[in-house]
Image (spheres, coloured by chain):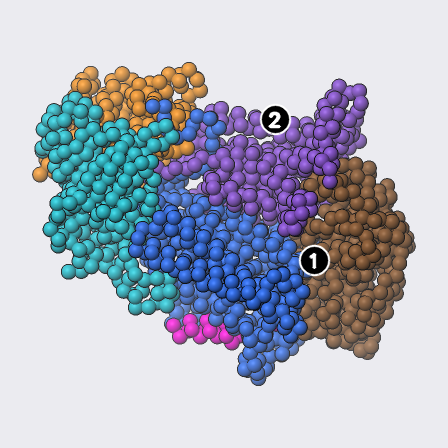
Chain colours: A blue, B brown, C purple, D orange, E cyan
């Protein structure tokens, strides 16, 4: 056979992007105007038939999507830096809040998108960079949410009251014991670490370290318990939770709490490979949810905690007030700004870690654990850092989520949420920061805007029977879009360059596993798959010699 | 012509879509029925359904979106109290009234929101009612209390347990389960502890399977539940053989009893090719209350479109008669002032009225 | 509480767990087959298996009034479910996984989730057309009876014996176990002893090299999906028979536990999946009755562990076991040669 | 052990007639890397053809293209008179080819015996398969010792033996060998070349041999091709190539 | 000059002592003893080889030294420090680097990045440094990049700097693995069949490279090879394994002429002296 098409040129000509400053600005202005108009009832009223078009919920969802695309284009397109800056900051700091003034749901939507984006960024570290499939990621989100939720709600008063009534044998003595235990164990942990730095760690020293760790945990629990008991007198005063002033402290605490839970979960399970890890994290995610559902005293169980407080920043409120926001919007606007800052921080940390030796170590263990270890990369430590970093992002976002919802219950932290975040990561492009943010935006927009818009727009169309109203088949539509996107762009919407290289490794080859590394999570080199095992008694390794 | 919309928020996809769709369809039927009246007044009445996927965050997002649509003047929803609580809070600032066809958790109205109303009984009246029935009619001394670990089921079961304990009834077991298929260990426990009655706070398609397995193991102990059991599907799931000795409390009279309900059931079946269940009726009732309130607000506003605040206040103040579940009026926090709780008994696969008793919310 | 009451109780809890375990086991095999060959957690399997349950429901419904022998109905239901689920699985593979052969492994995982969502709504839609949501099986007469209860029948001694030790099973439970055992045996034979099985295992380890052996890997993958789907069909019908009611969404939870069972036993191992399934079934049930033991032994903390924890029991056991045996109970310890 | 020599009963330039395998102007790519830039090559029935060249010359790519592991983008490829360009590997293998791939590619989780049995996938006669397994064991007694060891845990050289034995299971008409001596101890290097010659003589097997051990490869081959950066630099009788000054310098390590 | 920041170079003259002392090292797999009580000393700044028939246990021996397998018995000391029980990364930190028989490069990284990972364990910057971009971070990054540049230059692969490692030709991948291992600043480097897949010409280059590793960087080399020409001309000392046990050791010419070695490994045809000289093709 003579293959008809002539050989392609060996090297693709580098595509030179034209400068699109003008188009970017134009797009920004047009979409901003559209957004503002379509969310201002007065203007819509004055527009007549055009207003009706804009009022259509599908159109409205599209307008919102287009507007958000601004930020994307500012990032993607080649344009003057000032234009990018204007578009990026203008969209996020000016136009969006402005539109949010008339349509609060835009703020809610944006916060939700950014919460998910941060979650996706966190999971991206774990899955995309370090190659650890975590299906229980939402657990850390829950930890963050409950950390704040418990303290900043009437729950805290309930807990104090409970301990006031049931102090057990806890008292000042316990506090002292707890403090001593904490100090001693923490001290010995530091000492052992120091020792291990000088002398090679032995099994014994590792064990003692673990033991000391357990002791430390016990100490902290004792201290916490006695503090709670001793302060139970103020249960009445704290009936509505702690003062919102603690918000900032808890921002740090929620990060730490989630990171610690990440470490605790990670320590036993990170030794496992591939999908063993996936299913065990899935399980632990469920464990955390079920615990939240059962520890009624702390979490109010299935009833959920409400109302959860939020920070109250007087100067911000007065600023928002002068800008024409309604008091009920202050908090949402505040959280919007906060989440913007947080996402910038998360992104920064992500990028910086990625371009450091830690990032390289992550990718190395993803590619080949054994070679990475042989090159001096400590496996557990590197994985734990990934796990804890990912967890901490989820933790802080969990707290913001709790503050935004003012209500948290275990339902919000189920397996489906973990899967949703994972799909954002993969959809956007594993390992690519801009990609996963886009993935989060697309999925969230789809779920919170486009699909509902579709349902609403078709609700009163006479020829669509109610039974097949799209609002009834959100899963079908979402699933189809997911499948279609994966089939059309398996590398993700904004793929990581590294990944693309892997994926397009050889269209002419029968298969990618050609190179023994077809699987994104598979070690390079020889392919070792679980396969279907035989059951022959005698086929343990080792011959008959 | 001005368009006026009412919205529903309920799960239209996922495992609870069956119930959520019932609510939406019930409301749709009411809208269909009232549209001509609105038309006469020069309004184009529409229903816009939102899917909350039984997820609080999605429900809140839907609520905020609804709040932003000025044509929407009222909301019927939700199915899950867990969604209703944050959703109503999100609607509150824009004075958008919400009328719940299903949410029984105390917290829903205990927060005292001006916009949140419900036409169903609170858990703390449904619970004691169930408990009283267990003691007085079933004469049970020992009760096994189960719940489905949702805000609804657990809240209700807790109220029942509290009431039973207060009256000195022994609780031989109390636990929650998310299991939907295999109840063998619970059945074994029940066999072991031999209660006189079982209370299960939850929804019919879980409880039905449970009862079936219970009866399969030869246990004929009465099973009592709340409004979550109000479904024509329950006897089918339990199966002919076991569909006896099952009781539940509900605010809607048995559909067979009312002529109005018969027409409702028929047109529901006709419109949606789907038999109406309890929540369909509640959805219909909640929407009817909403629409009647709307009409009243329109009239009060000189046949002009009222503001949301007007609608909210009108509905809270009004009294609505002739609903499937009787007369509706709300107290200061939006609880139904007085309702009749019917205790239904499933006998040989048919729901029949066992007793009825009036209930009142704690505040008035 | 005296032993005469407690013993049957424990026996029953365990037997109930074992029966449940057989259901898990056979669902788990569908996951394990597909996982074995593509290293893909086929999230859509829960819907493939529920499709089997729906098919079974329809067959029993249609034959409801026919005078046909109950076992024949069962056979018909099983067969149809196997065919439909098997073909469905093959179709899914063709459309949603095959185009992604070279992609990173998480990509087909996400499509699997997408397919799972699609199928849920499709099933709901199809049954919704007839105004149904919860599908309740109408079993042939006698299936729900106690096993070997009729005095004088040839198996009455067995039935009497079982009841004397407190085992309380129905005919359908026995049917379930028998069908499951038969399917497991057949599958084990096929995978380990036949040429087809060897080829599937070769493909699962290295598709390209399998091609160099003259094996058409796509056909083998299709065959695997067919077998896995057919097993899913069987498990669906068994699930329906055992628990009576299914709906489009009821596959998700047991699916997760079944996959956990597969992992616990060692992913890829057939006997492992069975062992894992049985173990999880029993554990789930035992956790559910912990409070009874707690009350008996006077241990307060045990008393709070009740059915609300039974769903996470499997996961906790999984963590504990995997910490000591990182490749599952019967999984090969994968000493990697470097 | 006799020092391997070309099979005497065949003409030095191989038998005439229509070629068994013919590549002409083949271009193959790895994405944008142009690995084969129009190479042509023929092998007649019963010939041993050696393919030599430096690192990255495209030897492996050539074998992969022939066996169907990758598609050529351009050019013709005929085998036994049939056009096989773009045919997937499993089809060409069913036409009597065998390929010992670079890097051995043993099935790690199958036992040694199972690896061999899978190698005989296209055969159905159980007795014949067993015979061939024993034949393989006879070539490499180490495999027999380790019959039930998992392929993946075998040592590098043992895996190489297994890969060769596996390819011989079907008694191929065309054998593609990619560096069969790699990782083998000197004793076995000789054994391998003996086996190749034996197969060629006794079964008239055609062999396309890629070797870094060019001295030995040229010693047993009838004809040889020299590849360099994806292009065919030289071809001719093996003995002539072995004498070529530039070849000696570039590949044989002569100064 | 910069080189000294990566490698101390052969500053100190070779002491007579051994850098690696292995004694009684044994590994059993199920019923199989893959390595059987092997004792071996590697003199500092020497080039030594481990040879033996296929399956003799050479790779397993390396795997135990580098902590990938835990030995069943025996002791391993690097410059007096016991290595038994250390994880592979700790062994690397202690000063042993290695290459693999089946090349194991990081497949999604460029050549440069591969080497930078090799440098990882010697870098001082921490998580916090990376997030805050402290000076230490910049110094570390600079050091890693420099290490990559130097090592790429050293093995002659500079032109592949930005190419994905696994796209390199086979022989170059082997060299890259060596470069990556060297970037860890080892005292001892273990090479598992470095010449496999190279033609005689390339093997000559490799030989020169290995000599330079020892002479210019002062790194002790221990290698496994089947290419006798390379082994005999390069190594100063040879250990021979067969069926897991040491059957011979000594200087190249001693080993070459040992009948046990000839019988087990080189083959009857291999007369003394045939290997190690300018080999003529035996046509
Ligand atoms: N999987 C791959 N992806 C990208 N490029 C590749 C791949 N395999 C080989 N190449 C490139 O194709 C060219 C030819 O490689 P090939 O493996 O055919 O060479 P070779 O002659 O077999 O070399 P060696 O002696 O190293 O085995 C080389 O430039 C190599 O870098
Ligand atoms: N994980 C394992 N399980 C069982 N046997 C093993 C394992 N690893 C190695 N072996 C066996 O131990 C012996 C030594 O293997 P090793 O890889 O060390 O050999 P080698 O000397 O490096 O051989 P080669 O020169 O072929 O690479 C071999 O027979 C091999 O089959
Ligand atoms: C019956 C349930 C579906 C709803 C329940 N009444 C609730 O408040 O959540
Ligand atoms: Mg090659
Ligand atoms: Mg080796």
Q: Residue at x 40, y 19 (%)?
A: D129
Is A90 in the magenta? yes
Left or right placement of residue C42 versus residue A495 in this view: right
Residue that badge 2 annotates: C182
Q: Provide the secondary structure element on which disc 1 rests.
A: helix
Q: Give the image location of residue C196, x and y in percent.
A: 48, 27
User: On residue B258, which mark appears?
Assistant: none
Q: Residue A190 lies in what quarter of the image? A: bottom left
**Extent of the magenta region:** A81-104
At a point 70% along the width and 35% down the height, the residue shown is C7
Relative to B307, residue C291 above or below: above
Q: Residue at x 49, y 68 (%)?
A: A252
Q: CA distance from mark 1 to mark 2?
A: 43 Å
User: Which quadrant of the structure image shows residue E127?
Assistant: bottom left
Q: Residue furthest front?
A: A173
Give the letter of the chain under mark 1: B
Q: Position of residue E2 (x, y in %)?
A: 18, 60
Residue at image coords 30%, 40%: E64
Q: Nearer the viewer, residue A289 or D232?
A: A289
Task: Please tell me the numbered disc located at residue B151.
Answer: 1
Nearest to viewer (mark 1 / mark 2):
1
Q: Nearer the viewer, residue B310 or E189?
A: E189
């Amino acid at each position: 056979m003579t293959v008809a098409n002539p050989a392609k040129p060996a090297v693709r000509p580098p595509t030179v992007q034209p400068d699109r400053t003008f188009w970017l600005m134009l797009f920004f202005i047009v979409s901003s105007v559209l957004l503002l108009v379509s969310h201002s009832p007065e203007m819509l009223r004055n527009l007549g038939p055009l207003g009706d078009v804009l009022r259509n919920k599908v159109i409205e969802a599209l307008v919102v999507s287009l507007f958000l695309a601004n930020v994307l284009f500012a990032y993607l397109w080649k344009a003057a830096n000032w234009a990018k800056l204007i578009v990026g900051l203008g969209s996020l700091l000016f136009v969006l809040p402005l539109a949010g003034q008339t349509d609060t749901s835009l703020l809610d939507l944006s916060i939700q998108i950014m919460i998910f984006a941060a979650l996706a960024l966190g999971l991206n570290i774990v899955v995309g960079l370090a190659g650890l499939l975590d299906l229980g990621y939402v657990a850390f989100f829950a930890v963050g949410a409950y950390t704040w939720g418990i303290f900043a709600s009437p729950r805290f008063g309930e807990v104090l009251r409970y301990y006031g009534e049931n102090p057990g044998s806890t008292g000042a003595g316990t506090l002292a014991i707890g403090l001593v235990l904490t100090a001693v164990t923490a001290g010995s942990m530091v000492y052992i670490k120091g020792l291990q730095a000088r002398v090679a760690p032995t099994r014994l020293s590792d064990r003692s370290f673990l033991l000391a760790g357990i002791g430390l945990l016990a100490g902290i629990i004792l201290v916490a318990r006695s503090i709670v008991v001793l302060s139970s007198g103020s249960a009445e005063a704290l009936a509505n939770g702690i003062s919102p002033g603690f918000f900032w402290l808890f921002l740090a605490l929620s990060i730490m709490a989630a990171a610690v839970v990440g470490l605790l979960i990670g320590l036993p399970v990170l030794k496992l490979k591939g999908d063993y890890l996936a299913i065990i994290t899935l399980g632990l995610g469920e464990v955390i949810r079920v615990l939240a559902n059962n520890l009624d005293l702390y979490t109010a169980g299935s009833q959920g905690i409400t109302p959860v407080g939020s920070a109250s920043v007087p100067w911000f409120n007065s600023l928002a007030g002068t800008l024409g926001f309604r008091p009920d919007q202050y908090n949402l606007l505040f959280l919007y700004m906060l989440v913007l800052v947080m996402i910038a921080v998360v992104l920064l940390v992500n990028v910086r870690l990625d371009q450091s030796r830690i990032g390289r170590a992550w990718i190395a263990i993803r590619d080949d654990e054994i070679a990475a270890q042989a090159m001096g990369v400590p496996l557990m430590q590197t994985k734990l850092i990934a796990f804890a970093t990912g967890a901490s992002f989820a933790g802080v976002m969990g707290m913001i989520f709790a503050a935004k919802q003012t209500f948290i219950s275990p339902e919000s932290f189920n397996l489906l949420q973990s899967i949703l975040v994972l799909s954002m990561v993969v959809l956007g492009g594993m390992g690519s920061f801009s990609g996963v943010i886009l993935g989060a935006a697309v999925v969230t927009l789809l779920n919170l805007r486009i699909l509902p818009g579709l349902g609403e727009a078709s609700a009163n169309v006479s020829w669509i029977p109610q039974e097949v109203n799209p609002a009834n088949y959100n899963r079908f539509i979402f699933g189809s879009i997911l499948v279609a996107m994966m089939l059309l762009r398996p590398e993700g919407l904004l793929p990581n360059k590294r990944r693309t290289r892997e994926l397009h490794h050889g269209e002419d080859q029968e298969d990618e596993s050609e190179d023994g590394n077809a699987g994104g999570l598979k070690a390079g080199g020889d392919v070792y798959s679980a396969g279907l095992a035989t059951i022959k008694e005698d086929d343990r390794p080792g011959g008959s010699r | 012509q001005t368009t006026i919309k009412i919205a529903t928020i309920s799960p239209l996809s996922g495992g609870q879509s069956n119930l959520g769709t019932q609510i939406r369809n019930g409301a749709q039927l009411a809208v269909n029925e009232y549209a001509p009246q609105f038309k006469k007044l020069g309004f184009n009445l529409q229903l816009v359904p939102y899917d909350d996927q039984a997820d609080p965050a999605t429900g809140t997002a839907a609520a905020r979106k609804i709040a932003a649509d000025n044509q929407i003047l009222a909301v019927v929803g939700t199915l899950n109290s867990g969604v209703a609580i944050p959703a109503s809070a999100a609607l509150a600032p824009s004075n958008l009234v919400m009328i719940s066809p299903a949410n029984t958790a105390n917290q829903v109205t205990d927060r005292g929101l001006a916009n949140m109303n419900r036409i169903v009984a609170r858990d703390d009246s449904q619970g004691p009612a169930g408990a009283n029935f267990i003691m007085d009619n079933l004469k049970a001394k020992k009760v096994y209390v189960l719940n489905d670990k949702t805000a609804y089921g657990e809240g209700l079961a807790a109220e029942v347990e509290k009431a039973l304990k207060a009256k000195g009834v022994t609780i031989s077991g109390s636990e929650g389960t998310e299991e939907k298929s295999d109840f063998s260990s619970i059945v074994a426990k029940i066999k072991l502890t031999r209660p006189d009655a079982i209370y299960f706070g939850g929804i019919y398609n879980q409880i039905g399977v449970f009862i079936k397995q219970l009866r399969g193991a030869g246990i004929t102990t009465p099973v009592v539940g709340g409004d979550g059991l109000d479904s024509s599907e329950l006897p089918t799931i339990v199966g002919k053989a076991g569909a006896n000795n099952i009781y539940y409390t509900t605010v809607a009279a048995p559909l067979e009893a009312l002529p109005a309900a018969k027409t409702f059931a028929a047109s529901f079946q006709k419109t949606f090719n789907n038999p109406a269940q309890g929540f369909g009726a509640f959805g219909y009732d909640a929407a009817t209350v909403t629409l009647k309130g709307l009409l009243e607000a329109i009239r009060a506003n000189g046949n002009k479109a009222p503001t949301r605040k007007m609608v909210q206040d009108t509905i809270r103040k009004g009294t609505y008669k002739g609903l499937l579940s009787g007369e509706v009026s709300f107290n200061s926090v939006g609880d139904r002032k007085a309702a009749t709780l019917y205790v239904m008994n499933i006998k040989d696969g048919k729901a029949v009225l066992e007793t009825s008793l009036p209930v009142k919310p704690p505040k008035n | 509480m005296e032993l005469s009451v407690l013993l049957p109780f424990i026996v029953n809890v365990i037997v109930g767990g074992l029966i449940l375990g057989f259901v898990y086991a056979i669902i788990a095999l569908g996951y394990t087959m597909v996982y074995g060959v593509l290293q893909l957690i086929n999230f859509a399997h829960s819907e493939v298996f529920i499709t089997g349950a729906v098919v079974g429901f329809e067959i029993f419904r249609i034959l409801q009034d026919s005078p046909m022998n109950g076992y024949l109905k069962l056979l018909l239901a099983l067969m149809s479910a196997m065919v439909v689920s098997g073909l469905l699985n093959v179709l899914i593979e063709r459309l949603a996984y095959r185009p992604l052969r070279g992609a990173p492994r998480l990509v087909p995982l996400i499509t699997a989730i997408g397919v799972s969502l699609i199928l849920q709504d499709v099933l709901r839609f199809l049954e919704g057309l007839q105004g149904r949501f919860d599908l309740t099986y109408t079993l042939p007469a006698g299936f729900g009876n106690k096993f070997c209860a009729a005095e004088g029948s040839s198996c009455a001694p067995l039935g009497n014996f079982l009841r004397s030790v407190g085992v309380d099973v129905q005919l359908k439970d026995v049917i379930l176990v028998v069908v499951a055992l038969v399917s497991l045996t057949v599958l084990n034979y096929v995978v380990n002893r036949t040429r087809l099985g060897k080829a599937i295992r070769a493909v699962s380890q290295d598709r390209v090299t399998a091609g160099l052996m003259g094996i058409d890997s796509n056909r083998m993958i299709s065959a695997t999906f067919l077998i896995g789907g057919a097993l899913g069909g069987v498990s669906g019908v068994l699930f329906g028979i055992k628990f009576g009611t299914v709906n489009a969404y009821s596959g998700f939870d047991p699916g997760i536990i079944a996959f956990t069972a597969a992992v616990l036993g060692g992913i890829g191992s057939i006997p492992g999946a069975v062992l894992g399934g049985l173990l999880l079934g029993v554990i789930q049930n035992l956790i559910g009755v912990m409070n009874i033991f707690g009350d008996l032994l006077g241990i307060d903390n045990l008393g709070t562990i009740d059915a609300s924890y039974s769903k996470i029991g499997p996961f906790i056991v999984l963590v504990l076991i995997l910490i000591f045996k990182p490749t599952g109970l019967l999984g090969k310890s994968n000493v990697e040669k470097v | 052990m006799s020092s391997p020599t070309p099979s005497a009963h065949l003409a030095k330039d191989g038998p005439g007639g229509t070629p068994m395998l013919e590549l002409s102007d083949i271009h193959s790519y790895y994405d944008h890397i142009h690995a084969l830039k129009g190479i042509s090559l023929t092998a007649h029935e019963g010939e041993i053809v050696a393919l030599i060249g430096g690192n990255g010359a495209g030897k492996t790519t050539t074998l992969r293209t022939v066996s169907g592991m990758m598609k050529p983008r351009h050019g013709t490829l005929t085998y036994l008179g049939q056009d096989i360009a773009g045919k997937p590997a499993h089809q060409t293998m069913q036409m009597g080819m065998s390929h010992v791939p670079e890097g051995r590619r043993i099935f790690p989780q199958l036992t040694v015996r199972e690896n061999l049995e899978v190698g005989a996938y296209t055969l159905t006669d159980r007795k014949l398969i067993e015979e061939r397994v024993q034949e393989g064991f006879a070539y490499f007694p180490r495999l027999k010792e380790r019959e039930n060891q998992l392929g993946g845990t075998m040592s590098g050289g043992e895996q190489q033996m297994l890969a060769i034995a596996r390819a011989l299971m079907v008694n191929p008409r065309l054998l593609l060998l990619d560096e069969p001596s790699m990782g083998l101890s000197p004793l076995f290097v000789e054994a391998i070349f003996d086996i190749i010659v034996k197969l060629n003589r006794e079964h008239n097997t055609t062999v396309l041999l890629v070797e870094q051990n060019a001295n030995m490869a040229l010693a047993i081959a009838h004809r040889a091709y020299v590849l360099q950066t994806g292009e065919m630099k030289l071809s001719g009788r093996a003995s002539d190539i072995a004498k070529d000054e530039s070849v000696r310098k570039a590949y044989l390590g002569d100064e | 000059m910069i080189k000294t920041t990566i490698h101390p170079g052969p500053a100190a003259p070779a002491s007579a002592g051994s850098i690696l002392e292995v004694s009684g090292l044994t590994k059993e797999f199920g019923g199989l003893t893959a390595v059987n009580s092997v004792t071996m000393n590697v003199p500092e700044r020497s080039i030594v080889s481990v040879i033996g028939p296929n399956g003799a246990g050479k790779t397993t021996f390396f795997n135990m030294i580098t902590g990938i397998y835990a030995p069943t018995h025996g002791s391993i000391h690097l410059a007096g420090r016991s290595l038994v029980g250390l994880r592979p990364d700790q062994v690397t930190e202690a000063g042993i680097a290695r290459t693999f028989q089946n090349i194991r490069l990081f497949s999604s990284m460029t050549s440069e990045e591969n080497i930078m990972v090799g440098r990882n364990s010697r870098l001082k910057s921490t998580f916090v440094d990376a997030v805050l971009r402290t000076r230490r971070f910049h110094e570390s990054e600079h050091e890693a990049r420099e290490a990559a540049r130097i090592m790429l230059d050293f093995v002659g692969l500079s032109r592949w700097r930005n190419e994905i490692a696994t796209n390199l030709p086979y022989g170059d991948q082997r060299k890259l693995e060596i470069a990556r291992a060297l970037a860890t600043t080892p005292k001892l480097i273990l090479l598992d069949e470095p010449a496999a897949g190279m033609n005689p010409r390339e093997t000559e280059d490799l030989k020169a490279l290995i000599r330079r590793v020892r002479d210019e960087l002062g790194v002790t080399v221990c290698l496994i090879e089947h290419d006798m020409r390379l082994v005999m001309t390069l190594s100063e000392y040879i250990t021979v394994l067969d069926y897991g046990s040491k059957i011979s050791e000594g200087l190249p010419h001693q080993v070459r002429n040992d009948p046990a070695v000839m019988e087990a490994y080189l083959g009857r045809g291999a007369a003394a002296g045939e290997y190690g000289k300018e080999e003529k093709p035996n046509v």
